Each structure stands twice: as C-alpha cells, then as structure tokens.
Amino acid sequence: MLAAIQKAEQGYIARFERHFNHSVEEVWGMLTENDKLEKWFSELRVEDLREGGTITFDMQNGLFEKMKILELRMHSVLEYTWD
C-alpha cells in the first residue's frame, strides 16, 4: 500500500487512493458504518459523521483517541486527524 506523503504546517499528510471492484456505496459503508467497519478495523468507531465530528480509536489499553473529521464529502472524501 503506497501513500503520497506531503509535509504540512503541523506534521505530514498521507493520502491513500484505492480502486476496488465494489460500488462506491459499498466501500463508503465499510469506512463509515460501524457495523461494517468493525468487521475489518474493530478499533475504529464513527461517533459523529460530519465535518467537525469524531472517529474514535480504541487503543486496546483502556484509552480512546478522538480523531476529528476535517473534511467530509459523502461517497468521496473522508479526512480525519490521526495522532
């Protein structure tokens, strides 16, 4: 899996682009619907799917990282922080 890495003002931006043999709706659901997301990345949970909303990462040690959704364009862009 390759990413385009770009230096940003406060860290770096990693951009991944993938092409799948599935519909946009199916892939989007796997990224944003918790019942589907947990099947492949059980540590992530979408709490509030909107710009400014949050995705939670379960650190598996009792701690949870809140990641802010920076940009959201339905079925197209899901950008969030990852500390």
Image (tube, grey):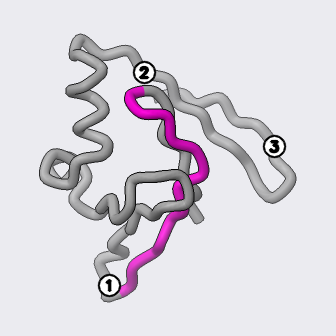
Q: Which mark is residue 76?
A: none
Of badges 2 and 1, the one in the foreground is 2
Count of marks overlaid on the render: 3
Q: Residue at x 38, y 67 (%)?
A: 57
**Within-10-Å neighbours for mark 3: few <14, some 14–19, many 20+:** few
Looking at the image, residue 6 sits to the left or right of residue 30; the answer is right
Where residue 15 sits: x, y (%)?
60, 33
Viewport quadrant of the N terminus: top left
Looking at the picture, how far across and down is residue 38, in whole percent? 18, 54
Numbered label attached to residue 61: 1
Write down the quadrant of residue 79 in the picture: top right
What residue is rendered at 50% in x and 23% in y?
17
Q: Amino acid at mark 1?
A: Asn
Query: Within 10 angstroms of label 1, few (less than 14), some, or many (20 or more) residues?
Result: few
- Secondary element type, mark 1: loop
The answer to whether the residues at label 3 and label 1 have Cβ atoms under 8 Å apart is no
Q: Nearer the viewer, residue 35 or 75?
A: 75
Q: What is the spatial separation of the Cα atoms under label 3 and label 1, in whole angstroms? A: 31 Å
Is 21 contained in the magenta span? no
Magenta region's main secondary structure? strand
Q: In this view, which residue lies farthest toward the bottom?
A: 62
> 33 and 61: which one is in front?
33
Q: Which residues are magenta?
A: 63-75
Q: Quadrant of the C terminus?
A: bottom right
Above-or-below relation of 75 to 51: above
The residue sitting at the right extreme is: 9
Q: Position of residue 52 (x, y in %)?
A: 55, 60
Q: Which residue is mark 2?
A: 18
Residue beneath disc 3: 7
Residue occupying the point 33% across, 59% down = 46
**Given the image, on which type of amino acid does mark 2 rest?**
Arg
The three-letter amino acid code for the residue at tag 3 is: Lys
